Every structure is written in structure tokens, then in C-alpha cells.
Image (cartoon, rainbow, N blue to C red):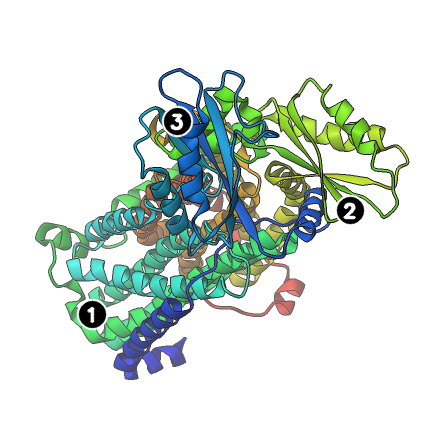
Amino acid sequence: MSNLSRIIISRSKFIVLFWLLALIVTTLLNTREGSAFTDSLSLPKSESQVADDLLANAHSAEELDSLQIVFSSRNKSPLKQEELRHIISRIGSLTFVDSITSPFDPESQAISKDGKIAFSTVNLKNLNFGNRNERIEKIISKASQEKHSKVQIEFMGANNQSGGESGSHTSELIAVIASLFILLITFGSLTAALIPIIVAITGLLIASNLVSLASNIMSIATFAPILSTLIGLGVGIDYALFIVSRFRQSLRESRSVDESIVISLKTSGRAVIVAGLIVCLSVLGLFSVGIEFLHGVAIATSISVLVTMCAAITLLPAFLKLIGTRINSFSIPKRSRKISSKGPENTGWQRWASLIQRHPIKWTFSASFILILLFIPASSMHLGTADAGNNPANSTSRKAYDLMAKGFGAGFAGPLTLVASIPVGADSSVLDNLYAQLIQDSDIAQVIPAQYLDSKKVAVITVYPKSAPQDTQTDSLITRLREVTIPDALQSSPVHVYVGGAVATFFDIGIVLTDKLPNFILSILFLSFLMLVIVFRSILIPLKAVFMNLFAIGAAFGVVVITFQWGWGEGFLGNKGGPIESYLPLTLFAILFGLSMDYEIFLVSRIQEEWQRTGDNSQSVRRGLSETGGVITSAAAIMFSVFLTFAFGQERIIKEFGIGLATAVAIDATLIRMILVPALMQLWGKANWWLPKGLARLLPKVKI
């Protein structure tokens, strides 16, 4: 870090220009190339994927996406064909519409029994992230050109899970304003508060451009940019906060600007690098799961963390060199004097540390009890995919879902697609036997008989369950179809039938992720433990960090279950109770474990610094907490604010991430870092720093 410090000090203007040039170049490239985010999920070798592949091969090579237009009579009388003919014709004339069905077609079953609700399916050509909103808006516009006072029109399908992105930029702005306010309180200076914001936003903009460009060469989910922004903004401001804090501390100790930059990079800068690498290590562990959908999430998040980390250790020190002692300009008079007059031994944090050290056993049991209490709901987590019935009540997808459920049943929002592969010369009459068994199933509302494709090599039977897509009853139906109904109907026939469709895909993903979650968690725990052993040259400290972080994440899962599965958050988040997205626990664990390690490194590295200087464990714990407690609390408050603002967006999955991340950060910064860590380190004494001599000789030496 000394060499990096010298380069930054001597080339500060060049480094600032380099980052500005990087921002301009990536923005221009992103403007030219655009993005290609996708919501497609694939799970190689799964039954749902086999079904989807058979359908894709049977249809034309051109990729199609569909959505439903739901019609409802406003005057309680049955819908009339002439009332819908014009709107269907208008939508069908759009160049990107491949086809549109009419509920009044002779073979259609798209009109409710009372004739008051109907739906049409629109197949769209090459729908993607870049043109999705524009094309949906054009369809809505076409549907609204005529005055249909007697017909209510709603849409469901292509955008029913995304819910739009309108709220994301508002969330980012609110998060930045909240962060600036917290930094003002922390530093007491507008200049010192603005620098971390500027550095983090610069890094985040570049990272966002890179993520967008990466979506053109690999599959990245549509929610990944928002999630990577969520993580990047939080860690970017936090990393800059830690370095600026150490820089200002060195200036208060009468060191020069250059000396202060060197010290801040050799201490907080090293901690930032280790913390950032641990976050990336945890997130990139998603590659071990083998699901391509999660690879893009891992790449997007890692790009945001790496770029903002690099900005914190290069662009930020360059700014500090140019600003120098003016870092404290535009100060809040009383707040600034209060901060500058306090030494580490004259703060509330010093008194708090002393209080914890006087009663470590009592504090350990109290904090552990709260963690276990929050952890309990996580044991009842139900994985699946939330249907459009969980969307905001005023969204068109939610209204369409409610109308479909009223007119046809909740299962019509998520049909199951049974795809048959028929070898040449095989007897396809077994599909009639299957149809006969399906219509007798008490959990099935309606069955569309086999439709043959690709010269009768492929057949499709559409099954509408009575239960909603997110219900456990639907999961049971999928399992029964695969294990009982289909095998009984086909017997020894060479015809193979696979259960596919979006609901079956999420069901399969949930099973795979549930099976792989234990091994994934163990691998992340082991690698993080190994890294912390190398960093802190201790056995007990890494063990403590692993188990404490595990409990904090479990408690965060518990809050997610309470809020979204049990439905306690419906009043302020607008979402009904439903299953937790199948890929959320694994992804959230990877991110949270990395973020939790951040505060562990910043706190314990400061304690380690004092231990190496004095050899007094109690004094090291007290001084380490005194000097970092305020900064860690401010950093946690910033990250909590960033994450919480995203909980009030449009997408349910982002809300789940926002609540989970915000809860984990709050628990980590209070119960873990401010209570359990100092209490346990006080109890263990010198044993904190014990490392077998043989192992000590084998491990590389890493200084923070």
C-alpha cells in the first residue's frame, strides 16, 4: 500500500482524470451497445427445461413472449364479441405482435361461465429488457384508443413480476440524501460528507455501465442492475467513509496531508480491500450452484463491489490529496467542535465498551436470546414464486390477476404445460388416457386436450390448477403429475410427457436450490474462516465471526418470512403473504455473509492493531470499539438507509432483498459488533489471538 500511496500522492490529478475518462467511455459504450437483461430462467436437465426445449424446437426459431389481456364487463352483463373485436384487431396490427387470440374463437375456453370475464393471449416477437416497457405501453395505448365504457381492460404476463422500474431511481435519490445526512452528522463538515458520496456515485455509474454491457454477452436478470446498485451504493459509501475517517483522525494528530493519506490507505485501505474481496468471494460462490440465472446476479454484484472498492482506494485518496486540510471546510460549528474535541477515551463508545466488559456473560446471553428469537420464523420458510396476486393493488397485473381468479379460478394465472415427445411410429392414443385421468383430478380446474405440433412429434396439454401458482397445493399437484398420474397413464409407452411452464420451472429451481443450499453455506463458511485465520492469525476470532454472522443472517431470514410469507408487511409494503422467491435465500446468504464480514474486519482489525501495540486484551477491545464504534454505526446507518429505501420499490424480489439486507445490517451493527464481539473477546482474553505454531509457520502473513 505504500507504493500505491506514493503513486496517488504524486499523480492525484491524473488519477481523477482517469476515473472521469472511464466514466465517459463506459457511458458512451453503454449508450451505443445498450443492454440485454432477461427474465428467462433455465435449469439444465430439469423436467421443466426439457419441456421448454421441446416446445422451442417445435415452434419457429423466432423467440416469442406472451401476455394476457383480460376483459371484464362493467355493467354486469355478458361481454359481446363486437365490443372486443376492434381492440383485438388494433393490437394485432402492431408489427411486433406475432399473433393474438380471440376469446370468441369456436375452440376457445377463454370466457368465464357467466360471460362477464374473458382474456386474449398476445404473442410478442423478440421481447427483451430494452424494448419491453415501450412495447407494453404501445399495446396499452392501442387498447385505450376507443372509449370502452362498458369494458374494463387489464394486462398480465410479460411484466407481471417486474412491476416496472419507475421507483428505482427515486429509491436511489432518497438513499443518497439519507446517506448525506448521516455523513453530515458523522463528520460535521459538508466537504467531508460530500466526498464519499461523489466517489461512491462515480464508481457506481461506471459499474452500472459495465453491468449493462456485460448483459450483452451473458444472461443477467432484469432485477440484477437494481440489486447491484443497492449493494454498490451501500458498500461504496461505507468504504469511503472508513478511509475519510482515518484520514481526518491522522490530520487531528498533527500529521501532514501526505502522511495521513499513507496511514489511511495502510490501515482502512487494506481493510477495505479485504472486505471487498470477501464480499466478492461470497457472491461469486453462486457459480458453484450451477444455475446460469444466478451467474449473472453474481457477476453484476461483484462488478459493483469491485469498482466501488477500487474507487475508494484510488479516486478517494486522490481527492484527499487535492483537498488536503480543506476537508473540514463548510463545517457545522457545534458539531465539528464536538467531534474534534473527543479522543477515543472520552466518548460514549468508551463507556459502552467498559459496560460490556464489566458484564460480558449477561450481555452475551441477552443478545443471543434476541438472535434466536428472530431466527425461529426462518425454519418455516416456504420457497416458491409469488404470483401477480402479490403485486401492488393498483397495478394492472394485480387487477388482471384478480379478474382471472374471479372468472376462472386462481390457477388460470399459472397454467402447467404438459409437453409430450412422440417418437416416429409411436401410438399417441396414450395421451387420451392421460387426458381422461387429468379431468378427474380434483385439484385441476380445466384441461385443454392435446394440441399436436411439428408433424405430430410434439403434443401439448394445458392444465389449469384450481390453486394459485404460489400455493403449496400447486406444488403437490406438480409432484403427483410427475410421479403418479403421468406414469400410470403412459405405462410402457415410448411417449414421454414432461411437466413444464413457469410455475413448474420455479418449482424445479426451488428443489435444486434447497438441495444445494447446505453445501453452499458450508463452502462459504469454510473459505471465509480460512481467510480470517490468515488475516487475524487466530482460531477463535474466525470461528466467532462465522457463527455470529450465521445467526445474524438467520435472524434476517426470519424477518423476511414474517414480513413477506406471513404477510405482516402488507400494510406498509403493499404485498400479500406468499412464498419467498426460491433463489432469494441462497443469493441473500452470499451477499449478507460478505457484508457481515466487512464490519468484523473493520472492528477486529482495529482491536488487533492495539493488541499488537500493547499486548493488553481488555484495553485493545475497549480502544478498538471506542475508535470504530461511531464510524461502524454511521456506516451501518448508511447501508441500512440505502437498503430500506429499496424495500418500497415496485418489484417484490427487490423488496425482499431490501428488507433482508437492512435487517441483517441493523442486527450486525448492534447485537453482533457492539455487544457479542466485545463481550466474547473480553471473556476469551489472550486466547483470542492463539494460533498453533505449526499452522502459524504455514500461513502467509497479511497485514491490515
Q: Nearer the viewer, mark 3 or mark 1?
A: 3
From this view, report whether residue 654 is shown above or below residue 252.
Answer: above
For the question of whether residue 238 can be seen, the reply is yes
Q: Residue 570 — which label? A: 3
229 vs 345, nearest the viewer: 229
Q: CA distance from mark 2 to mark 3?
A: 47 Å
Q: Secondary structure at mark 1?
A: loop
For the question of whether residue 661 can be seen, the reply is no
Q: Residues within 10 Å of mark 1 (few under 14, many from 20)?
A: few
Of the two numbered discs 2 and 1 on the same chain, state the one appearing first in sequence: 1
What's the residue type where badge 1 is placed?
Answer: Ser
Quadrant the N terminus occupies: bottom left
Write the residue at 45% across / 31% down: 70
Q: CA distance from mark 2 to mark 1?
A: 82 Å
Q: Are marks 3 and 1 in contact (CB under 8 Å)?
A: no
- State the residue lying farthest toward the bottom: 10
Q: Nearer the viewer, mark 2 or mark 3?
A: 2
- State the residue lying farthest toward the right: 492
Q: Residue 457 — which label? A: 2
Quadrant the C terminus occupies: bottom left
From this view, report whether residue 503 is shown above or below residue 273.
Answer: above
Q: Are marks 2 and 3 in contact (CB under 8 Å)?
A: no
Q: Residues within 10 Å of mark 2 (few under 14, many from 20)?
A: some
161 vs 329, nearest the viewer: 161
Q: CA distance from mark 3 to mark 1?
A: 54 Å
Q: Secondary structure at mark 2?
A: loop
Q: Nearer the viewer, mark 2 or mark 1?
A: 2
What's the residue type where badge 2 is placed?
Answer: Lys
527 vs 228, nearest the viewer: 228
Determine which residue is flagged by label 1: 254
